[in-house]
Image (cartoon, helix red, strand yellow):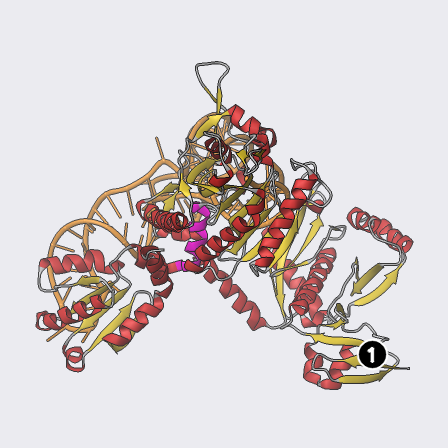
Amino acid sequence: MEIKITLPDGSVREYPQSVTGMQIALGISEGLARNVLAAKVNGQVWDANRPIDHDAEVKLLTWTDPEGKQTFWHSSAHLLAEALESLYPGTKFGIGPAIENGFYYDVDFGDRTFSTDELPKVEAKMLELARQKETFTRSEVSKAEAIAYFTEKGDPYKLELIEGLQDGQITFYQQGNFIDLCRGPHIPDTGFIKALKLTNVAGAYWRGNEKNKMLTRLYGITFPKEKELKEYLTLLEEAKKRDHRKLGQELELFAFSEKVGKGLPLWLPKGALLRDRLEQFLKKAQMKAGYQPVVTPHIGSKQLYVTSGHYEKYGKDSFKPIQTPDEDEEFLLKPMNCPHHCEIYKTRPRSYRDLPLRLAEFGTVYRYEQSGELHGLTRVRGFTQDDAHIFCRPEQVKDEFKKVIDLVLYVFRSLGFEHYTAQISLRDRVDRSKYIGSDELWERAEREIMEAAAEKGLPTVIEYGEAAFYGPKLDFLVKDAIGRKWQLGTIQVDYNLPDRFELEYVGADNQKHRPVMIHRAPFGSLERFVAVLTEHCAGNFPLWLSPEQVAVLPISEKYHDYAQTVFAALQEDDIRGYLDDRDEKIGRKIRDAEVKKVPYMLIVGEKEQADGTISVRKKGEGDLGSMSLADFAAHFQQQIKAVFEVKSLLETEV
RNA sequence: GCUGAUGUAGCUCAGGGGUAGAGCACUUCAUUGGUAAUGAAGAGGUCGUGAGUUCAAUUCUCAUCAUCAGCUCCA
């Protein structure tokens, strides 16, 4: 019986009985066969060597396909395990998946500790094994066989994994002497792996549970070509230079002090200026969108948080209550603004005509984050939320939600965040114990968020278990320089706090009704937003933050007039800087003290005056040669384009 | 909080049981027609903090604090 294989271009090939992805590739070209890592068979990724015995749509996967990379890295994890087993017999293995960039394997070395110094040895062993071009062989085994194998091998983690698997769906993969429990798929043989780097060693709890044993996690990345590894490592180095903690120090945006306390940022003058501009920008936008500013104190009585439910949920892991001379009195540093805003809502009876009521506050809050969680400005213990709470009627929720989506997207677009993930964060599918409120209200809120996002045409991903304890969220995540994701903007629908605070409004029917609350923060927090913004704008901040951008230097007094002409012309292009008068003491002062900090130095003399150009030197890059003023202006604007965009947006009317 | 690593000048880092080192940055002076340079001089450190071992600790041991990577967490 012949089988028909349909390729992505629509062409159909016929084969007798069965065929593997690799054989199909060979039939197309040898070059393709050398690069084929796996095959997508009717949407499922298969080993390139696994026979296909039925009609199917097949796509051959190579390094350029995301699934190809994932297969490649997953196989690399097996290679790592093989190397570890060979170097450290008795090692027990957890899981070893591919990740966004590379792979890891969780292993248990028993009593010995593994140090980073040993990584080169493991890398060498991996390369040695890779060169042997060991084939990945798939075999289907029964549950009993699988248990027998790992019982004899003495690998408790694998046994635990097998427990959760169905008999008849268990497969082993073997390369060389190493056999692993694995669903697959894998690349044809280890020879495809030409370049590798073990990047990191860290601890990780078995199955991600804090109560389980901590295993050693080895991270690595592999490539089919040496050159790609080099490029990747260079990219990583470059990214590290954009780390906001490094730039924040260099640009004097913020600092930390052991004496003040960890996780408590000190904003330096330049950082405070940047923060202030962002605040003004958003305040204008919010004013237009019908928000009303409010201000509330930094502390609130403990009872406030008992009412909101926050005390029960977070009380024991928070900053301890503040005592007063009155023994029965306790205050908490506010960890969020919502309860205060609820009390503002309650200051007078509300009519349905008052709603939606949008109360906004740049509220500084304090949360006792676990010490290991603190991270530059992205995770701190004291931070300012660009918070607001919208109190509205149930039928207004979706509309208000959509308006907030517009605002968040406006902010992101204005500040140049083109790449973000919009994530709908819902309740855990199983464990509902960590949430307050009725299923009915939760389902309603979850549905409204999904509908609002869909109606806005916003592409979203859904994550279960990521909701706040009082309601589902729509979060906007942006990556930092090295690819870690951070939640910036957030919009949350909440039916629960209005209940707890017994918020009411009088409807058109003259009856009392309960409003719905929308919590929202487009930046998330000023701290985290500045951090991510810094990493995105990278080296451009100093230009933006200090107006001194170029220095114009005449070679001698004779060319001073021309230098002055150049200087004036540049200023018309909004390029500011210094004109160095080299024949006066003050000129030297400027050059010595200030010019060194300026990124561009423009030198004018006889030649330049003659052909109307300037000689340009750029700090760190050296001589850029001679160019016309117009060319320089274009180059300059290009270089600091992002900065100008941010700047003009923050300065223009919203 | 957990596992592992790190902490020496403003910054980046070297060193190592017995006067504390470099580069960049900083201060002063000189020099500068292709130039953010050059020359000279100078200032700057209880070697994160505390205890222990020792004749002697920045170095070894322990504790503690902070930072970094990852895990867990994130109202």
Quadrant assignment for the C terminus of chain A: bottom left
Residues in magenta?
A526-538
- Taking the image as drawn, is residue A371 in sight? yes
What x and y, as percent, mark residue B63? 54, 30
| Residue A325 percent across, percent down from the top left | 43, 14
- At which x and y percent is residue A629? 23, 75
Marks counted in the figure total 1
Viewed as shown, does residue A331 lie left or right of A564? right
Q: In terms of secondary structure, what is the magenta stretch mainly?
A: helix
Give the side of residue A59 with respect to residue A141, left or right.
left
**Which amino acid type corresponds to the residue marked 1 in the rendered image?**
Val
What residue is pinned by disc 1?
A19
Question: Which quadrant is the N terminus of chain A positioned in?
Answer: bottom right
* Chain under disc 1: A
Between A241 and A16, the one lying in front of the other is A16
Q: Residue at x 69, y 41 (%)?
A: A440
